[in-house]
Image: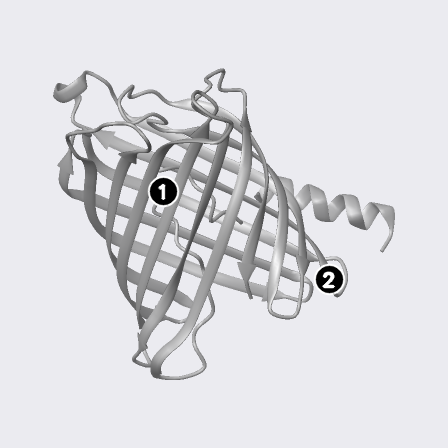
Amino acid sequence: MTRHAWLAALGAALVLSVAAPLRAQTSITHPVTPAPPGAGFFTGYTFHMNAASMTGGGDPAFQWDADFGGDVDLVDYGKGRLNFLANYQVVMGDQFQLFDPNQGNYALEFSSSLWVGKTEIAGVFHHMSRHLGDRPKVFAVAWNEAGVRASRLITRGPWRASAQGTIAWITNRAYVDYNWEGEGAGDVRYRLNRYWSAIGGASLTLIGVDQAKYGRGLQTGAHAEAGLRIDGTHGALELFAAYDRRIDAGLFDLQTRTFGLLGFRLLSR
């Protein structure tokens, strides 16, 4: 591959740049996967494990970010599928020890979809629960949301790209002031050779709030990343650098903070 082709691939990754299971706590992004080969039970799954260092926040509570989880197609009924997703995210600082877990965030989701051509339209029920690690907390920080997601996967030659958009309404909440959430996300992958690919992803999150509760307005979050992917026989390794504008980064301070991330990701294939 020529030098200009390398630069074009990396540039496209940066511009289109969500190759990101590593997401902010409020994210409702879901892995975009192709349709199963046919109707059946447990027809597909994905798994990821990420870890990244955090810079730029100026807070000793935000030094490391890691998460792991996956999703499984429980049933494929020909015209769509029933999917279950679970994810756990831990945020670590260095306040009490070198790796001090101060947040644990749990996401659970059920979705049921229909194929409209090559686009998948899904009804989604999503639960998010946020907790403190090694610290007392006597009340809940959590919410449920129900919504609709549209996603599409495109593969052409060495290119693989996906896009999705989700709109969800908060059906139950504790402590937070969220009323609705909307998210748009996309990712791109360009295969350089048998093993290496250039990757990139980006997402934008909007959260509408009850202004009477905390006296604030529309919340905006964003994530963008670029990196390299190494494909193996049964899994893949991604190395990435990212920009992360995170809504309500702390459980209680209700602030949007911006971080730089540098990390790795292990993935099923």
Q: Is residue 75 above or below residue 248?
A: below
Q: Position of residue 259 (x, y in %)?
A: 50, 26
Q: Nearer the viewer, residue 65 or 218?
A: 65
Q: Is residue 245 left or right of residue 225?
A: left
Q: Is residue 83 above or below residue 5?
A: below
Q: Position of residue 153 (x, y in %)?
A: 49, 62
Res 231 seen here: yes
Residue 159 figure quarter = bottom right
Q: Mark 2 belongs to which amino acid?
A: Tyr
Q: Position of residue 98 (x, y in %)?
A: 51, 27
The residue located at (35%, 29%) in the rendering is 247
Q: Residue furthest right?
A: 2
Res 80 seen here: no
If the image is split into quadrants, where does the C terminus sit?
A: bottom right
Q: CA distance from mark 1 to mark 2?
A: 30 Å
Q: Is residue 173 above or below residue 40?
A: above
Q: Secondary structure at mark 2?
A: loop
| Pointer 2 residue | 195
